[in-house]
Image (cartoon, rainbow, N blue to C red):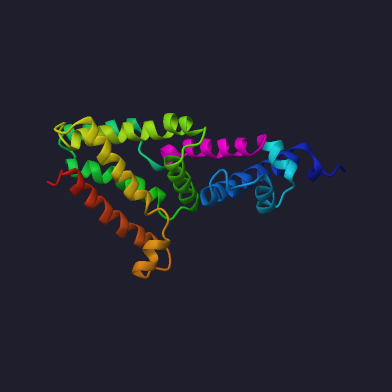
Amino acid sequence: MADISKGPKNKKSRGEETRQRLLLVGARLFALNGFRGVSMRNLAMEAEINLATVGYHFGGKLGLYEAILQSMIERRSEIFPSLEEVRERVDMLKQNKLTKSDLVKWFFGFFIRRSAGSQETMWAALIITRELAAPSELYPMLDEYLFTPIFESLGEILAVAMDGKVSTEERAIVGTALIGMVLKFVHPKVLMTRIGWDEYTPENIEIITEVLCRRAVAFVGCQE
């Protein structure tokens, strides 16, 4: 009988495992060291593969970095409400089924609960921080497919919550500040050290969510 473990499906499975390992290792290294601070040799050593494998799967370091950014873009709807979901909630507000503060709390509660405590999101947040501080040649891809859709959705929330009484510029500043506030809580080390938590438990994440949502409502100015 033929040894099916050596067949093409098994090779394909091993190849996909290697690819996913490179994506995970790459995300961590790029988050901690930046694009220029990571070498192909580092990637191969950390992923426990030979150097040629990085090139085989991604064509090189830049190809791997682009694939990591693409995976972040693909996860956008897992972490942020889509524009369609936002518009459904806005319609509920117009029907008096929600208050403005409910709307703001829903958006940020969605974001916080799906990002806090996730190692994958932590690395993504650090990569985003680096891209905002020192944009790479791939920044336009992030801007078009990640940042713009997020801020479009958030912009509709803020336009309704702030009654259209503030300028587009002010809404953009408020939205950027609020997103930045939440991203600081994705990496738990600083907070846990200061308040004595050992880890992000579901209960601790709910405490963070309640506090940040309440403060977001106050910052937006839609207390009711």
Extreme residue toward the left, this view: 224
Residue 63 picture location, percent across and down: 61, 35
Q: To which quarter of the image does residue 151 belong?
A: top left
Secondary structure mostly seen in the magenta stretch:
helix
Viewer-proximal residue among 133 and 7: 133
State the count of labels: 0
Query: What residue is rendered at 71% in x and 44% in y?
Result: 14
Q: Is residue 200 visible?
A: no
Figure quadrant of the N terminus: top right
Q: Please, is residue 15 above or below residue 197 in the view?
A: above
The answer to if 133 sits in the magenta stretch is no
Residue 87 picture location, percent across and down: 28, 31
Query: What residue is rendered at 39% in x and 67% in y?
Result: 193
The answer to if 75 sits in the magenta stretch is yes
Q: Is residue 212 visible?
A: yes
Magenta-drawn segment: 58-78
Viewer-proximal residue among 90 and 183: 183
Residue 133 picture location, percent across and down: 42, 42
Query: What residue is rendered at 33% in x and 44% in y?
Result: 179
Residue 158 picture location, percent across and down: 23, 36
Q: Please, is residue 193 above or below residue 15 in the view?
A: below
Lateral position of residue 158 relative to residue 135, left or right: left
Lateral position of residue 18 relative to residue 137, left or right: right
Q: To which quarter of the image does residue 150 belong?
A: top left
Lateral position of residue 5 relative to residue 144, left or right: right
Extreme residue toward the right, this view: 1
Q: Please, is residue 105 above or below residue 158 in the view?
A: below
Query: What residue is rendered at 77% in x and 37% in y?
Result: 8
Lateral position of residue 73 relative to residue 174, left or right: right
